[in-house]
Amino acid sequence: MKIILFGLLVAILAVQEQAALSLRPNNRHMWESRSSPIIRHPTFTTFDYEEMPVAEVKLLPEANVDSAEDSKKLVDEKLDKLSQKFDALQEKFVKSDEKFGKLEKKLELLGKTFTAIRAKPSPKFEKIGSKYYYIDDSESVNWFEAAHKCRALGGNLAGLQSEQEFKAVSEKLTNEHYWLDINDLGTEGVFKLLSTGKEAPYLYWRYPEPNNKGGNENCVQVLRVDSKYAMNDNSCDFKFNFICEKNTLE
Ligand SMILES: [Ca+2]
Ligand SMILES: [Ca+2]
């Protein structure tokens, strides 16, 4: 009986030992299953570092969001500036367009004026005696300008080279003063025709002309006194009407 009891005791002790062995840490699987997940894994530290890129990857989208917002702000600012520049350019364009419009109107007016000038009939020379004359009663100019105007019309200041010519033309005159082609600009007292360079063949002076008054009367005019016309030497700077002549209309 004692032997049986002893054998039973041994058996019990053996079972307990087996149970104790099953709980020892060197049983890896059992140890791991019963350990904290923070310290249970021998490569926890490595695992933790391996997780870091995951955390960084998570930050990247946030950074991209901020960057995208900044980019949007920049784009908006640039668009605003471009819009302002566009407005400024548009304003300049409008002003330029207004200036162009004004210039266009001026050009149109100039064109009309030019057309009117061209359409204005050339002064008509009328045949008086054997020559053609244009008697200008509309403007008063000095002797030189009168000579230029007659030249521009294809003629010369009238010479009235005979009594017949003088009388025929005088009958057509209405104003008081008209320049003639005669002058003594070259030699005092020697009256010549500008058109021929020769001495005037006919002179019909109002008494006591020519007096070269003030030493400065070198151009000859037709002067009306008491409803009669005669010649007078006068200052070339005075502004009178004038008479032009042509031998032909061509
Ligand atoms: Ca003189
Ligand atoms: Ca005089």
Image (cartoon, grey):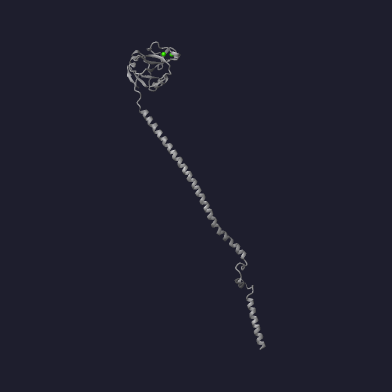
Residue 225 in the image, given as x and y percentages of width and height: 36, 14
Query: Residue 188 is drawn in which quadrant?
Result: top left
Which residue is nearer to you in this view: 200 or 168? Answer: 168
Residue furthest to the top in view is 208
6 relative to 169 in the view: left or right: right
**Residue drawn where x is 64% and y is 82% of the image:** 12
Query: Residue 202 is drawn in which quadrant?
Result: top left
Residue furthest to the front in view is 226
**Residue drawn where x is 50% and y is 49% of the image:** 76
Query: Residue 13 is drawn in which quadrant?
Result: bottom right
**Residue drawn where x is 60% and y is 63% of the image:** 48
142 relative to 23 in the view: left or right: left
Residue 96 in the image, given as x and y percentages of width and height: 44, 38
Residue 215 in the image, given as x and y percentages of width and height: 45, 13
View quadrant of ligand 2? top left
Counting every numbered tag in the picture gives: 0
The quadrant in which the C terminus is found is top left
Residue 72 in the image, given as x and y percentages of width and height: 51, 51
The quadrant in which the N terminus is found is bottom right
**Residue drawn where x is 52% and y is 53% of the image:** 69
Task: Check the image and report above or below for 11 versus 104.
Answer: below
